[in-house]
Image (tube, grey):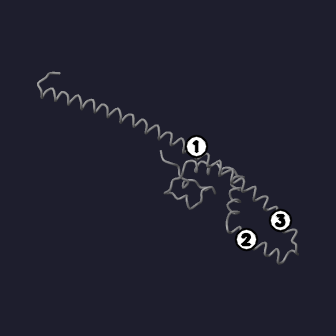
Amino acid sequence: MTTPRFGDDRRIPQLVPRRLLRDSQTHHPAVLEDAKRRSQQFHLRLADRITTFAGSMNFVVLHAGIFAVWIALLEQYPWPILALVVSLEAIFLSAFIMIGQNRQAAFQQVKADHDYEAQELELKTNTELTRQIHLLTEELHRRFLQDAGKAADADTGRSP
């Protein structure tokens, strides 16, 4: 069974950057599952897009330009409406940041659970392989010693 790839889907969620979603690359199953789940709900897609934009340099440059124009042309000192707008924007952006942090924490937990299950399965497999190797080694030693004993008896003329 192969790991699903996002190259087959038409809608690429914002959780995994587009540069990582090449057809030749596979991703952690927890990444794929979380991205699919988030892409199915409008409010999660919207929150991801807002958080992505708010954390970019485009956001900083756009706001610096808007605030410069606002201060220079639209409002008189001490800029009461600008302060109100910026405060409201900060409130909403902090909410989106917390949504993003909660999403990231949940994603990390899912990934950690998946990794734990995979490591436990690998540990069980390695333990079973070690037991089988031990049994085969004991069988080889038993046969080797038994054959060596028969050869020694044949050399001395004794019968078993």
Q: Give how far across and how far down residue 117 sits, in percent.
A: 53, 41
Give the spatial CA distance, label 2 vs label 3.
Answer: 15 Å
Give the spatial CA distance, label 2 vs label 1.
Answer: 40 Å
Which amino acid does the dot numbered 1 rest on? Asp
Quadrant the C terminus occupies: top left
Disc on res. 85: 3
- In the visual, does 121 lie left or right of 72? left
Which amino acid does the dot numbered 2 rest on? Leu
Number of other residues with Cα within 10 Å of mark 1, as a class: few under 14, some 14 to 19, many 20 or more:
few
Q: Of helix, strand and loop, which one carries label 2?
A: helix
Of residues 45 and 143, which is closer to you in this image? 143
Which amino acid does the dot numbered 3 rest on? Val
- In the visual, does 16 lie left or right of 47? left
Residue at image position (68%, 56%) is 48
Give the spatial CA distance, label 1 vs label 3.
Answer: 42 Å
Residue at image position (67%, 51%) is 103
Q: Give how far across and how far down residue 23 sits, in percent.
A: 51, 57
- In the visual, does 147 lie left or right of 42? left
- The part of the image, by quadrant, that contains residue 145 is top left
Residue at image position (75%, 57%) is 94
Q: Which residue is mark 2?
A: 62
Disc on res. 113: 1
Of residues 64 and 119, which is closer to you in this image? 119
Q: Is 113 drawn above or below residue 147 in the view shown?
A: below
Residue at image position (79%, 62%) is 89
